[in-house]
Every structure is written in structure tokens, then in C-alpha cells.
Image (tube, rainbow, N blue to C red):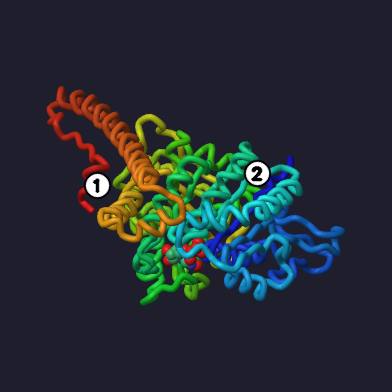
Amino acid sequence: MKVNNTIVISIGQAGNQIASSFWKTLCQEHGIDPLSGSVAPGTSPRGNWSSFFSQLGESGSGSFVPRAVMVDLEPSVIEHVKSTSGSLFNPANLISRQEGAGGNFAVGYSGAGREVLPEVMSRVTFEIDKCDNVGGIIVIHSTGGGTGSGFGSLLIESIKEKYPEAPVLSCAVLPSPQVSSVVTEPYNTVFALNCLRRTADACLIFDNEALFELAHRKWNIESPTVDDLNLLITEALAGITASMRFSGFLTVEISLRELLTNLVPQPSLHFLMCAFAPLTPPDRSKFEEMGVEDMIKSLFDNGSVFAACSPMEGRFLSTAVLYRGIMEDKPLADASLAAMREKLPLTYWIPTAFKIGYVEQSGISHRKSMVLLANNTEIARVLDRICHNFDKLWQRKAFANWYLNEGMNEEQIIALRASSQELIQSYQVAEESGAKAKSQDESVTASRAYAGGEDPRRTSSVSLRDLVDRR
Ligand code: GDP
């Protein structure tokens, strides 16, 4: 069977800083030198290396090149990548410009972004043409700045127009005032989320607010930096892609397409969250190993998720758990996951969406680890936070001129904000319908029990509105 090839496009400062860390980890996991792309003489890279790397030259003497396109509208981050990655990347795929997007979605989407688009699309096409079997495209970007939000949206739109069959997963970093103090981030994020809602096949949220807290609480870092947050993101991305890069236990690889098919029950509900276990501080991970049962408990704990919300209080529309490590643990992991599944607030209408993958190849920092990918209605709480911050600015039309001067108009801005509200509401409907059906179930059960003497009125359902109001 052909390996699925995945292309990774990174955009803007956050996107490229995360991608640098991600590619370094992938090289280590596959036994590829991160400065030259070569492997030890007489050996081949480990696993299904062609999923994320192409080969240059003859086997045995050739080197391995990441299927990567890295773009920024200003030069410093791409220059840094060039100066720290030796000859790993194809230099034609490292693209930058001089001016930057000035923290403005409109510049990335309509101004400087349009100018760089043809060159970037030609490199994407080059990479797609090199694939035997396009498994999908991962786009890493933030939504708070101008390049990741604006150019990221424009590029995903253009890719889906040209290659509608290729699944596109946006990995979007959401802003937090704890990490950045740029006031216009809520505008950029609302505009970008609207595009991602229309064009991406799925969007995996990495919420800086939650990541900052995790690095602070779990890794005991007083004042986490973006490098710390990027390590957390890299752990998750390496875990999520492990099943695309290494064959599973008694199974073939899980492709990006297959993952998204499992995780997106309705095209409009495609905003995902993730969690990773164990969250042991990196310097202790070699010495402190977590058992499988504790790992599963931690994975589903509200305090472990990479988005500032409480998934156990919402509803899981779909779930994937990907385990990597020692296969003797598989029976215990199967049993513990089955028990956990019974406790999860699932939705009534898709009760079985729970996928499990196993990969024997360990990650770099842990002998055993797990990633949870979830489509959960609590993502609305995160979106609501961003919208709330948007409204605080828009009520005073603060910084509106930045966008109006770049060609956006007020009607358009109001419509984009309304579209985000629709997105929140669609998760609200999903949550309420799941909860309502459950409470109907429970009242049937309860009335049966009442015949045996119990009180039937003890049914409960928590609506998203209640949860959001409690914020
Ligand atoms: P762009 O280059 O114009 O897309 O702007 P940035 O990527 O710098 O976007 C700014 C937002 O990204 C802010 O919310 C920053 O806190 C966040 N950010 C910038 N760099 C990083 C990074 O390396 N990691 C993470 N997690 N967030 C970042």
C-alpha cells in the first residue's frame, strides 16, 4: 500500500517557530540529521519516512528533505530558520518578504499577502507534484498577527480552490494577553476563524491561554516563553502525526484523511482541541514514568487540554486517542479507554465516534505517551472569549481604521463577527440536542425506576449558555 504523503506549510512568526521545533523532532524520531537531512551510512530512516520527507539522490547516498513550505511577510524568522537548519530544507521553499503584515489581517489577506501568493502556490504545487499519494496538508499559523491570520486564510482558500480533494488541517494558535499584548488580536482572530470555518477541512486549536497555564502549572515555569509553549505544541503534533509516520500495531498507518473523517461528523463542526499525557516537565520525563491508567485519566482531565475550556462539561462529538510506546500496555490501555468512554459526555446522535490508534515507536521525550484529539462543544467557550474581546474593541470602533484603510468595510466586519456567533451557536445546538436526548433517555430510565420507587425528576442537562454565562 502507498504511504500517504503529508505537506506542512508554516506561516508567520508563530507558525515558523513551531514548525522549526516540529521538524527537529521529526528528524530525531526518524534518525535523520537535522542539519543535513542525511542518515548514518548504510541505513535508512526509521518508519514511513516518505510520509513527511522526500528523498534526494540515490538510496544509500541521498538525503531526506522535509515536505515543508515556510512563509513569512517579514524576513527575521525565515532568516533564523536558514541560519540554524543547515541544508535540511529546500531553500526555494523558504519564502519571505521585507515589510511584514503590521499585525493586520487585511494586509495578509488582501495586500502584501496577494503579492506573495503566486510564488507560494507554485512551491505548494511543486511539493504536491512530488507526492505519490497526497495524504493531506497541515498549515501551522497563529490567528493573532497579520501574516498567520490573513495570509494563512488566503492560502488555505487558494489551496482548496486548486486542490479540493486534498484534506487541509489548520493548526491555529489563538492569542492570549498573558503571552502577547497586541490589542488588535481579537479582530484578526475573528476574521481568520471565519475563513477557516469556510475553507479548512478541520482546525486544531492551540490556545496560548491554556498553553501558558499548562507550562506554568505542570512544568513549574514561573513565566513561560513562547519556546516553552512551542514544546508543548510539538509534543502534541508529533503524537498526532506518529500514526501517519509509523505503522500501527497490527494495523496500517492512520492517514490525515482518515483522522479527519472520524473527527468531523458535520463539515460545519470542525474545530478540534487536543491534550497530551504525560505532562511531566521535560527535564524529569526520563526519570518519572506515568502508568497507562493515570495517563488516560490525565488526558481527559479538564486541566490538561490545550484550549482554555472544560471538555468534560461539554459534549464530545468525536474522539481519537493515539498511544505510542510499549505494546505490552495495549490490553490495559484498551480496557482503561473502554472504561473512560463509558464516563464521557458523548452526544446522543453519534455515540460511537471513539477512535484508538497504537504506534510502537516512542516519542523523543517519553517512552510512553498519548494524545487526545477531540471535537467537543466546549470549544465554543474559547470562541466566545475571543468574540467578547472583539466586541469590547468594536463597541468603541477602536483601531477600526487599520482595517477600513486596507479596504475592509463596516458591513463586512459586522458580517464576519456575526458568522463567528453562528459558529458558537452551532456548537450550542449540538450540545443542547445531545444533552436533551440524554435527558429524555434518563427520564425514560427514571420513570422505569420510579415504578420501582425512585424519583424520576432527578434528570439533568447543562446547556452551553449556562456554561458560557458561568465564565
Ligand atoms: P504573524 O507573523 O504576523 O502571523 O504574527 P505572529 O505569528 O507573531 O502572531 C502573533 C500572535 O502569535 C500572538 O498572539 C503571539 O502571542 C503568538 N505567537 C508569536 N510567536 C509565537 C510562538 O512561537 N508560539 C506561540 N505559541 N505563539 C506565538
**Judging from the image, what secondary structure is the residue with disc 1 in?**
helix
User: Considering depth in this image, is 300 or 286 the residue closer to the camera?
Assistant: 300
Whether ligand 1 has any atom under 8 Å from the Cβ at mark 2 is answered as no
Residue drawn at the location 41% of the way across and 73% of the way down: 224
In the rendered structure, the answer to whether residue 183 lies left or right of residue 58 reads left
- The amino acid at mark 2 is Gly
At 15% from the left and 22% from the top, the residue drawn is 451
**Residue 366: x, y in percent?**
54, 65
Dot 1 alpha-carbon crowd within 10 angstroms: few under 14, some 14 to 19, many 20 or more: some
Q: How many marks?
A: 2
Label 2: state its secondary structure: strand
Mark nearer the N terminus (2 vs 1): 2
Judge by depth and name the residue closer to the eye, 431 or 419: 419
**What's the mark number on residue 2?**
none
Q: Residue 55: x and y, percent?
A: 78, 57
Q: Which of the 4 image quarters holds residue 53?
A: bottom right
Residue 60 x %, y %: 85, 62
Between residue 59 and residue 411, name the one nearer to us.
Answer: 411
Residue type highlighted by circle 1 = Leu
Along the viewing direction, whichever of 92 and 21 lies nearer the viewer: 92
If the image is split into quadrants, where does the N terminus sit?
top right
On the image, which quarter does residue 393 sit in? Answer: bottom left
Residue pictured at 36% horizontal, 69% vertical: 181
Label 2: how many residues lie within 10 Å, few (<14), some (14-19) or many (20+)?
Answer: many
- Side of 43 where 415 appears, left or right: left
Q: Quadrant of residue 367?
A: bottom right
Residue 328 visible within the image: no
Q: Which residue is mark 1?
A: 467
- The correct choice, above or below, for 358 with respect to 402 in the image is above
Q: Judge whether residue 171 can be spotted in this image.
A: yes
- Disc on res. 135: 2
From the top left corner, tell me how far across and down residue 420 is, in percent: 36, 44
